[in-house]
Amino acid sequence: MKPNHLLLIILVLFLFSGCYTTNNFGFVDMQVMEPAVVSLPDSIVNLALVDFHRNPVSNGIKFRNNADSVINCYAAASLKGFESQTDSVQYFHHVAVVHNGLDFFPKGLAVPDSVLRSKMSAFCGSMGVQALVGLDTVWISDNNTNNQLVKQVVLGARWSFFNTLGGLNTYWKIYADTMLWIPNRAELITYEKNNRYPKTFVDVLETYGENNGARVAMLFVPSWKWTDRLIYYSGNEEMKRADSLVAKNQWEEAAEIWTKMAKSDNKNIEAKATYNMALACEMLGHLELALEWVSKSYHVYNNEDHKQKCKDYIDILATRLQQERKLKKQFGA
């Protein structure tokens, strides 16, 4: 074999070895808890969820004659979504749901703030709650024409937050959902000739309503979010055995293997094992230890792509540590 051919083969093998760490990876799914956007005082332990919406507000070419029931369906689903989200993390001791808020406030919330505060305080006191979240207004915008194949309906809702324990003004938030809908022939006839939204439309609308309520709840309560994390793979038999354990969600057992492989003389293996140890620590709830492992992995292997992966993970873990401190405050720990 000619020397230049041998040199070329050696160079190709070297390049392949250098890229091996950066290319042989996958992702694992995980759930993380994120803190609420608004940090409530520890003294707020019970909450009232009140429906104040009245006759629908419409903005369209032709207002469907069953829009009242559609709006009411959306409002009820929104309350359900809010309650479900708060229950999922058991953040409040009790959430009292009031579907007939207008019975207590005939004028809704369209009154001067000074008057509103005194009435709200009395109302919350009678229910034994320290704060109130209200669904104030729901509206629908339907500007579709008969020749449109894809129908677009915009639904909006305004929510309010009232704290009896402090603050001078009510907190307001508006959310809107754009719903794209392709009706079949029977639905199209119902929609265009009978001026009615069909049941299938209402069924989908309920999902939008629940998402709307859950989204509002996430302002005030921590929430679980799905995300993913990078994990390194290897052709090494021990590392493959760790992969099999991960597939069974046996992170502690996998960590035992990675701890051993983190002492490998092969820098490629050591870099992967130390990085995966950081992932195992995060999965097991040890964020500061995870940060130590990924920092070690950063210095193990002199490969820019690997170093960038470590930097990205360090940023993720640093954010999670900040969130954990905020969560402890929000849960009163």
Image: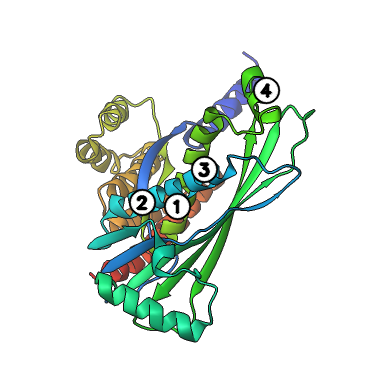
Seen in the picture, residue 64 relative to 16 is either above or below; the reply is below
Marked residue nearer the N-terminal end (1 or 4): 4
> Marks 3 and 1: in contact by CB < 8 Å?
no
Q: Which residue is mark 1?
A: 213
Residue 314 in view of the camera: no
Marked residue nearer the N-terminal end (3 or 4): 3
Label 1, secondary structure: give it: helix
Q: Which residue is mark 4?
A: 189
* Disc on res. 142: none
Q: Nearer the viewer, residue 329 or 62?
A: 62
Pointer 3 local density, CA inside 10 Å: few below 14, some 14–19, many at least 20: few
Gap in angstroms between the C-alphas marked 2 and 4: 37 Å
Q: Which residue is mark 3?
A: 69
User: Residue sitting at 47 percent across and 39 percent down?
Assistant: 207
Pointer 2 local density, CA inside 10 Å: few below 14, some 14–19, many at least 20: many
Q: Which quadrant of the structure image shows residue 102?
A: bottom left
> Marks 4 and 2: in contact by CB < 8 Å?
no
* Disc on res. 85: 2
Marked residue nearer the N-terminal end (2 or 4): 2
Gap in angstroms between the C-alphas marked 1 and 2: 8 Å
User: Residue sitting at 52 percent across and 58 percent down?
Assistant: 54
Q: Which mark is nearer the camera, 1 or 2? A: 1
Gap in angstroms between the C-alphas marked 3 and 4: 19 Å
Q: Is residue 319 left or right of residue 173?
A: left
Label 2, secondary structure: give it: helix
Label 4, secondary structure: give it: helix
